[in-house]
Image (cartoon, rainbow, N blue to C red):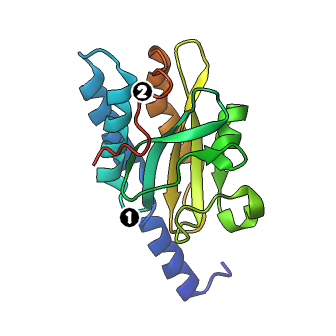
Amino acid sequence: MSDSPEEFVAERERLKKRPSRARYDKAHALLERKWRRRELAPDRMMREVVDVLWDIFAGSPYSWVGFYLLSGGGQSLVLGPHRDKPACSPLPMHGVCGQVARSGVAMRVADVGALGEAHIVCDPRNVSEIALPVRDRDGKVWGVFDVDSAQPAAFDDMDQRWLETILKRFEQTKAPEPGHQRPGESSV
């Protein structure tokens, strides 16, 4: 093995800060319990997803988590439930979240600085991001779930698979009406 002891320790510390399967499993189980015997209402579900994930992952590695919803005309994204600090709203469609909304494909960005003009800076401390489409029961994308981190390359396949599993429940709902969520509404 060519890694020095310092590199080994640094990698071990980096992995300690990563979300674990156990933490994602806990988040998923908490949300499923909340949704088990209640009507699946997307407005409430978004707040619950944001709150549960923030409570479990804040600072390790999440620095921000929230939903963006397509505006009535689909020309921008409007901030929905989020934690922990304010964020940009409305978002133009050229950034990561806009690309995810248009393509319907999740994106993981290890270094947002590498995106150049395609990155919309809401908090300059954030250096990596994962964004996933949110679909309704007809498969139509109506929003984007976005997580930022102050740690580089904070998200990987495991994060994406768990978040997709959690967001899959929205596919049993009808999309919220455009403009139903007030811009900047926070779950805090």
Badge 1 element: loop
Does the image show residue 111? no
Q: Which residue is mark 1?
A: 59
Q: Quadrant of residue 153?
A: bottom right
In the image, what residue type sits under mark 1?
A: Gly
Q: Nearer the viewer, residue 87 or 107?
A: 87
Assign the N terminus to one quadrant of the image.
bottom right
Q: Are marks 1 and 2 in contact (CB under 8 Å)?
A: no
Q: For mark 1, does the 10 Å Cα neighbourhood hold few (<14), some (14 to 19), or many (20 or more) residues?
A: some
Label drawn at residue 180: 2
In the image, what residue type sits under mark 2?
A: His
User: Residue at point 58% right, 55% down?
Assistant: 129
- Image location (x, y in percent) of residue 65: 44, 50
Badge 2 element: loop
- Image location (x, y in percent) of residue 76: 63, 39
User: Residue at point 54% right, 66% down?
Assistant: 126
Residue 70 left/right relative to 65: right
Q: CA distance from mark 1 to mark 2?
A: 30 Å
The answer to whether residue 9 is above or below residue 111 is below
* Mark found first going from the N terminus, 1 or 2: 1
Q: Nearer the viewer, residue 142 or 179?
A: 179
- Image location (x, y in percent) of residue 73: 64, 27
Q: Nearer the viewer, residue 22 or 3?
A: 22
User: Residue at point 39% right, 47% down?
Assistant: 82
Residue 64 left/right relative to 188: right
- Image location (x, y in percent) of residue 184: 41, 46
